Image (tube, rainbow, N blue to C red):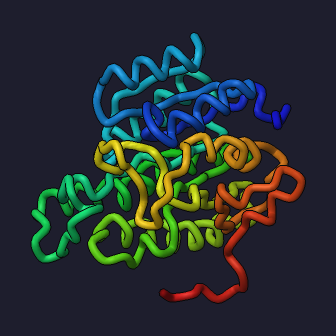
Amino acid sequence: MTHSSLEGQVILVSGGSRGLGREMAIALARAGAKLVITGSTQSSSLAETGKALGSTALTVAADVKDPAASASVVEQTISHFGKLDVLINNAGLGMRKISETFNTVTTRFWEAPPNSWSEIVDTNVNGPFYLARAAIPHMLSQGGGKIINISTSDQTMIRKGYTPYGPSKAFLEAASRAWAEELKGTGIDVNILLPGGATDTDLLPPSPNKKGADGKLLEPAVMRAPILWLASDLSNGITGGRFIATLWDENDPLKARSDTGEKPQIM
């Protein structure tokens, strides 16, 4: 489904060169949005995805765990396109920073190299904050905007051998709920989107038998339909939500919303 309100919207997707970010960026570009995508370094995948998005797309090599680089990306977006309507915090680091066999041999948190641990936390926790911190003043001045934070499944947050990746996403979800409350009445909506299972991306080590902990593996394209709706005017006023892509129903998008009740559930 296409959404006419996306035509001409300016959308920044961090970590947009591969995996989930690439799929979301392509879907949004096809719907008429103007895209800015980032990668932590200048790479062939960043260039190739930029080319696939079309001549209006802007690609920026920027490591989101660097606050100056994050601020610069937002500045470049506004300078190039004149505005910023939607920020999608997708850039993330997974457990491969700790171990290339984390999904077959349990990684024990006390054996994690501190530098690798810090890189994951800095990227997954601080990165979304740095980008949102830079984007929100502009969104406030224009009277609205959207922040969509990409997360993971509940069980991943507490699964043994998945720290600090899983807990970093738990933090992001808690922060998203708080941000939504702090931004109520401003026209800026904050929501969470997750695939609903392991997806076929570089977060998992390459293998002919690649699969998630549940034995399944989703295609990254599962994110396309929900991101179109969440980034469009159809979701205006919906904030603080948690949406699961595998539950998506175009006729009733709210069926994919999994946050129930006012009190947060502590796992």
Nearer to the camera, 122 or 187: 122
Q: Residue at 87% across / 58% down in the picture?
A: 252
Residue 178 % position (x, y):
57, 73
Residue beneath the point at 54% across and 43% down:
220
Give the residue drawn at x 84%, y 48%. Answer: 234
Answer yes or no: is residue 236 visible: no
Toward the top, the furthest residue is 55
Question: Does the image show residue 117?
Answer: yes
121 w.r.t. 221: above or below: below
Tell me the residue at 13%/67% (across/down). Answer: 112
Q: Is residue 154 above or below residue 64?
A: below
Side of 196 relative to 127 (left or right): right
Residue 186 located left or right of residue 44: right
Image quadrant containing the N terminus: top right
Please indicate whether residue 180 sits to the left or right of residue 127 in the image: right
**Between residues 134 and 50, which one lies in front from this camera angle?**
50
Quadrant of the rendered structure where residue 69 is? Answer: top left
Residue 237 location (% of width, % of height): 80, 59
